[in-house]
Image (cartoon, grey):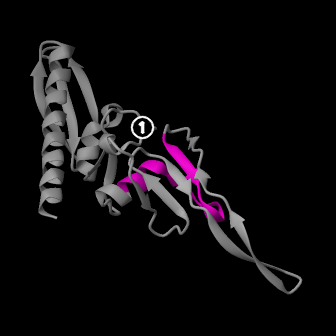
């Protein structure tokens, strides 16, 4: 896939690529000293990102503002809006390629969080229960004989929800 570059909205002088890279653009800026004004050249380059403690890649733009790279890619290529979440399909938070990102609602994002939203409970009489949080409410997926069966039921639900979200994104892009 060929790398495509687009200007970053709201940040003049920066581009973001479909492969998750950010660059500054070569530009001339005015500078004034002792009453004299002249233009000086800032050479464009690929920006290095820093890895946050939470695993996401972040860059620093002009003015010291720090921005997550996956948010820039999703804004320019997927039409991300406030209130949506960006999901990394392969689970790697620093993999910001366009093909790995998906804009989803907070409820679908919550389904993908294994550690906080899904748990397997052991009961003394009935085996394992799989519980998932959807739209702020817990949903009991049933009681299973083994932990593997409970995890498979949870994964099947998440796969269905993500497939629905992907299909709606494809349909929305086809209409545009």
Can residue 136 be seen from the camera position used here?
no
Q: Which range of residues does the magenta coloring cover?
A: 56-74
Q: Position of residue 133 (x, y in %)?
A: 23, 41
Q: Quadrant of the N terminus?
A: top left
Q: Which residue is mark 1?
A: 95
Residue 148 in the magenta stretch? The answer is no
How many numbered marks appear? 1
Residue reaching furthest to the bottom: 35
In the image shown, does 20 or 82 lie closer to the viewer?
20
The residue depicted at 53 percent of the width and 69 percent of the height is: 12
Please indicate whether residue 51 sits to the left or right of residue 163 in the image. right
For the C terminus, which image quadrant? bottom left
Q: Name the spot of residue 71 as percent of width and height, x first.
A: 42, 54
Front position in the image: 90 or 9: 9
Q: Residue 160: which quarter of the image?
A: top left
Q: Position of residue 129 (x, y in %)?
A: 17, 24
Q: Considering the numbered disc 1 on the image, is that residue within a helix, a strand or a loop?
A: loop
Residue 111 vertical position relative to residue 143 in the rendered view, above or below: below
Q: Is residue 106 above or below residue 8?
A: above
In this picture, residue 149 sits left or right of residue 64: left
Label 1: how many Cα within 10 Å (few below 14, some 14–19, many 20+): many
The residue at the point 43 percent across, 56 percent down is 72
């Amino acid at each position: 896939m060929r790398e495509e570059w687009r200007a970053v909205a709201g940040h003049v002088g920066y581009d973001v690529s479909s492969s998750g890279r950010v660059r500054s653009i070569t530009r001339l800026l005015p500078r004034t000293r002792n009453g004299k004004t002249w233009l000086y050249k800032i050479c464009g380059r690929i920006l290095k990102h820093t890895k946050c403690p939470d695993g996401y890649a972040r860059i620093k733009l002009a003015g010291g503002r720090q921005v997550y790279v996956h948010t820039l890619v999703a804004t320019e290529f997927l039409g991300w809006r406030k209130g949506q979440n960006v999901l990394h399909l392969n689970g790697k938070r620093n993999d910001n390629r366009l093909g790995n990102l998906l804009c989803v609602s907070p409820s679908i994002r919550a389904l993908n969080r294994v550690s906080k939203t899904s748990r397997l409970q052991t009961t003394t009489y009935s085996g394992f229960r799989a519980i998932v949080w959807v739209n702020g409410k817990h949903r009991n997926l049933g009681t299973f004989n083994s932990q593997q069966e409970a995890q498979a039921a949870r994964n099947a639900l998440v796969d269905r929800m993500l497939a629905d979200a992907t299909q709606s994104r494809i349909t929305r892009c086809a209409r545009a």
